[in-house]
Image (cartoon, rainbow, N blue to C red):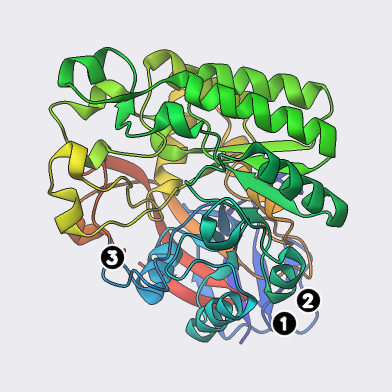
Amino acid sequence: MKKLIKNGRLIDPINGIDAIKDVYIAAGKIVGIGDELPEGFIPNKIIDAAGLIVCPGLVDLSARLREPGFEYKATLESEMRAATAGGITSLACPPDTDPVLDEPGLVEMLKHRAKQLNLTHVYPLGALTRQLAGSQLTEMSELTEAGCVGFSQADIAITDTQVLWRAMQYAATFGFTVWLRPEEHYLAKGGLAHDGEVSARLGLKGIPATAETLAIATILRLAKDTGAKVHLCRLSTAEGVDMVRDAKQQGLAITCDISTNHLHLTEHDIGFFDANFHLKPPLRSQRDKDALIAGLRDGSIDAACSDHTPVDDDAKLLPFGESEAGATGLELMLPLTLKWASENKVPLIDALTRITSAPAKILGIDAGHLSLNADADICIFDPEHYWKIEPAALISQGKNSPFLGLELAGKVRYTLVNGHLVHQA
């Protein structure tokens, strides 16, 4: 089916476009932009995007889809529909499912299920070690052939540094990327919140900033010695940002991301034990938040992600210390990024870079741009439309969010994947 998206403000960071331009789509591809009208093009469907932003489909670096094994928290279909409602056309999912994504057959099954749903593109991260136990390496080559785009431990640290060293050596040999959330296991063990005044006042065991920086120091040293490509997931500290900035200046193959939650929240938002603010990594100090905001703005932090972690109601209604960490985020990644851009005077084209082309580059996929002959993965949103974040407004099966009750600007009107209209609001 041929489609015409007309009158929209087209923003494409990769091609440096920010102008009113029409987009022509045929056979799932972009076949014309602006005045480049394909000869004899007659659309079967016209989308009038007047007053709306037309941009590349968003790319999310961390979305737990909860299948296989945790369908009581969410299903593949519910979360993929939530992704399209958030304008996300490509996403990476961590390997901490049940069973863990450490076998090619499991990865192939997940890819097949996702393809059958014909919604957003799903890119699995394979387990770096078997069962995420941190002792025996997985067959990374076989997992890559099955469809993995990188290898991760999710939120489970490798305590044996020799295993991490061998994993990075192996990954470097074959050009694989190692995804690690930097956290020193023993310093963070049993921790629930940032080790600071709030955790002390509430009597919650703290996780010091040193737990992150010590892990980063180890990872950077091993990356330098092995030559491995490393992606650091969900930075949360000011010192961590400085360390990554320095490592990049030294030429290390390091990239990193931040959760959109940490752009707007601090330890003080926990209030009186509100479990919706129980996150991993924990919400940290105002100083840390300011450093994260600045790091994303100056490019020291490459990308923002949703860190989507749907949790069932029962697990969130428990006392803070017993509740499960995580927050739903697929439908909030765009409005939270727009909020960050607005508050910090970041041009819209630069803000969209952080959730389109930059994460696509990290994943190593051809996405996040609107070039001629590219796949028609497109997000069309209203930047001025405010909507209230409440359970009934969320498509995700996970209704847990620290932003419940807040009104945010940025409503996705249309999402196209391979030229197919998969979401309309």
Amino acid type, mark 1 = Phe
Q: Which mark is residue 320?
A: none
Q: Residue 333, percent across and down?
A: 44, 47
Contact flag, marks 3 and 1 (Cβ < 8 Å):
no
Q: Which residue is mark 1?
A: 41
Residue 245 visible somewhere in the drawing: yes
Q: Residues within 10 Å of mark 1 (few under 14, many from 20)?
A: some
Q: Is residue 179 above or below residue 398?
A: above
Can residue 125 be seen in this snapshot? no
Location of mark 2 (residue): 38
Total number of numbered discs in the rendering: 3
- Residue 182 in the image, given as x and y percentages of width and height: 55, 34
Where residue 321 appears, x then y in whole percent? Answer: 20, 37
Instruction: Please tell me in which quadrant of the rendered image residue 374 appears.
Output: bottom right
**Residue shown at 69%/38% (left/top)?**
255
**Residues marked 1 and 2 touching at CB (< 8 Å):** yes
Q: Amino acid at mark 3?
A: Lys
Vertical comparison of 106 with 371: above or below: below
The quadrant of the picture occupied by the N terminus is bottom right
Determine the residue positioned at 73% across, 68% down: 144
Residue 207 x %, y %: 38, 25
**Quadrant, the C terminus:** bottom left
Q: Left or right: 82 with respect to 129? A: left
Disc 2 marks a residue whose amino acid type is: Pro
Give the spatial CA distance, label 3 vs label 1: 45 Å
Residue linked to disc 3? 73
Mark in the foreground, 3 or 1: 3
Q: Secondary structure at mark 1?
A: loop
Looking at the image, residue 321 sits to the left or right of residue 261; the answer is left
